[in-house]
Image: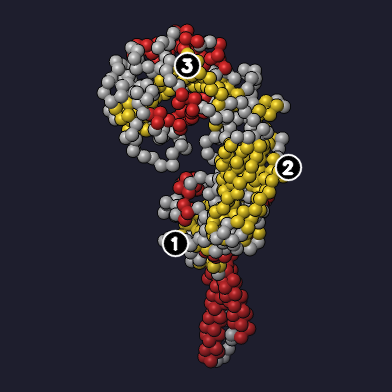
Amino acid sequence: MQFKNPEILYALFLLLIPILIHLFQLRRFKKTLFSNVAFLEKIIQNTRKSSSLKKWLVLCTRILALGLLILAFAQPFFPASETAVKPRETVIFIDNSFSMQATGKKGNLLTEAKQDLLTNLPQDERLTLVTWDNAIKDFDPATDRNLLLDLDFTAKTTNAESLLLRLNTYFSNDQTTAKQLILISDFQDTGLRQALDTNQVSQHRVVLQSTTLENYALESLSLERTGERYNLKVLLRSSFPTQTELPVSLFDKEKLIAKASVQFKERDTASVNFQLDTDQAIAGKLSIADPDLRFDNDFYFGINKTNPLKVLAISNADDDFLKRLYKSEEYQFTSVSENQLDYGMLSEQNLIILNETQKVPAALANLLKTHTQQGGTLILIPAMYVPSSTYTNLLNTFGFTAFSEKSDLPQRITDINYDHPLYQNVFNERSSNLQSHVIQTYFPLEKTNSILSLENGAPFLTENNNLYIFTGGLNITNSNFINGQLIVPTFDKIARAALSLPQTYYTLGTQNKFDINTTIPEDAVVVLEKDNQQFIPLQKKQGNKISISAEEGIEKAGLYALKYKNDTLATVAYNYNRNESKLQEVILEPIKGVSQNSNIPDLLNTLEQETNLNFLYKWFVIFALLAFVLEMLILKKFK
C-alpha cells in the first residue's frame, strides 16, 4: 500500500495527546464514613473497575477514529501496475502520408485519427505528437487542439528505419520514467511494421483499416515526337484487376483540350494515347475522378518551346555517324573541316566535337576552355595517325595528363561505369556482356575516373571539366564502337549534358536538375512560381546557361513557372511519388512486447486504466465513522 499524501502521516503523532491526557487525568474520590463499610467498599471497587474499562474503550475508539481519518487524508492506494506511479513520457506518431487519404468510418483515416485523439486524450497529460514532416512537443489537448486539427498530408516521407530512430530521440534518458510509443497508421509502409529497437519503450500500434482497397492512379506518361505531332502515352494503374472504364481528361492550364476513356479489361494496368501539336508550349494536367486516394488523381507535365541544341563537329575524318546521331529536330548539327573553322562559331554552340583533328592550336584550346566554362560540352576523338603529343596542350588545359605513345594491341571494351551521370537512368539492368566492342589502336591515358574501360583497365572514355575524351579513333577501320549498342545513348547523353533542358515532369523527392538558356544580367535570379507564391531555387549561371536545382523547397505537386521578373522562361511540372497508390490488405504479425489495437479509444482507455490508482480512503472514512458510532454506544450503553 502506498500513499498519495504521505506527509500527512506525521499527524499520527498527535494521537499521543489524548493518551497522555487519559493517563494524567486522575479522578479524586470523596470519602464518606459509614458504620458498616464492608459491603460499601465492595460496591466502590466494582464501580472503579467498570469506569476504568469504559474509559479505556472510549479512548481506543477515539484514537482509532482519528487515526483512520488521518490515514484517509493521506489517501492510501494500491497501484494498478508497476508503472502506474512513474512519470510518463508519451510519443504519438500519426501517419500523415498519402495512403491515409483512404476512406475510413468517419471520413479519411487521418481525419478519423485526429478526431479520436482529441476526444480520448487525457486532458492533464503533456505528450509529443510526431508526423512524417512535423513534431509538436509538450502538446496539451486542451489548448493545442488546433495544432492537431491543422495537420495535413505530406509527401515528405522517409524510410521506416530513419523514422523509428527519429522517434527514439523524443524520449529522455531518464531511467525513472515510463516511456510509451504509440504508432497510428494504416501500415501500408511495410517498414513501419517493425518494432523500435529499444527495451526502454513500450510500444503500441493502432492499425487503421480503410473501408475499401479500391484505387485508381495516373501512374506515369511518356512523350514521343513524330514529325509535327507529340504522342502522349499515359499509364494508369488499379489496386487490383478490374473491368472498370475510367474517363481521363487532358488540360492545358485550366482549359480542357481532350478527353478519353480507358478500359482495364481484367488487368491492373491500362494506357491511353493523346496527340498534341508540337508548335505550342503546353502546361499540361491529366485528371481522373477517384473518390478514394486523391493525391494520384492528377498528373502534371510541361512541354516547353525550346531551340534545338547546337552541335558543331570539327572534322578531319568521316562524320556520317555524327550526322545520323544528331539528325532529329532536337539538334541543329553543323559540320566543318578544321581548315575552314570560323572561331566566331564556337560561342554559339552547346556541344563541340573534335573529330580526329590533326592539330589543336593554343588559341583554339583556350576558346574551347572558355566554351566549357560557360556551360558547353566538348568531345575529343583523336586521330590515330598523328603523334600523341598533338593533344597534349588541350589535355593539360582541362587537367589531364598527356597521352602515352600509341598502343597497337587490340583491346575489347569490357567495363562500363553505370553510376556515372552519363549512364544514369539509361539501362534497365546492368550487364557485363560488352565483348562485341573492340578497338584496334588507342592512346594510353593515365588511369582516371573512367566511364568506359578496356579489358586491360585503361580508360576508353573519360571526362573532366566538361571534356569527354575517347582514347581511340571511332572510324570503322579502328573500332566497331559506332555500330554497337552504346553509341546512341553515349553521344545523346553527352549532348544533353551541354544543356539539360527541363524534363516533361519530375517526381518530388528525387533529383531534379535542369538548365535554361537565357540572357539575363549577371546578378539576376530566376524564381519558380505557383499560385502567386515564389520560391528561389539553387542556381548557377555559366554564360547564357543557368543551371537550376530544386530538390529542396518544392513540397506540393503542380505546374511551376520559371520566371525572370514577369517573363516566363519555362514550365516545370512536379508530381507526387506513386508508391502509396496501390492499397494492400494489412496483416501484421505479432511482435513480443508490442500491443496491437484496431482503434484509438480502446488503446487510450487501456493505457489510462494501467495508470489508475486504487484509492482506499473511502474505506478508512467509513471505518472512522464506525469507530465514532462505537464510541457513542459505549458511552450510552456501557455501565
Q: Nearer the viewer, residue 124 or 357?
A: 357
Above/below status of 555 relative to 471: below
Give the residue type at disc 3. Answer: Ile
Q: Are marks 2 and 3 in contact (CB under 8 Å)?
A: no
Q: Marks 1/2: CA distance? A: 49 Å
Give the residue type at disc 1. Answer: Glu
Residue beneath label 1, please? 589
Q: Dividing the picture into quarters, in which one does residue 551 lie?
A: top right
Q: Marks 3/1: CA distance? A: 66 Å
Residue beneath label 2, please? 255
Q: Dividing the picture into quarters, in which one does residue 308 lie?
A: top right
Secondary structure of the residue carrying tag 3 is strand
Query: Which residue does the image show at 40% across and 12% down from the upper left?
Result: 358
Q: Residues within 10 Å of mark 1 (few under 14, many from 20)?
A: few
Q: Marks 2/3: CA distance? A: 47 Å
Q: Nearer the viewer, residue 581 or 276?
A: 276
**Of labels 3 and 1, the one closer to you:** 3
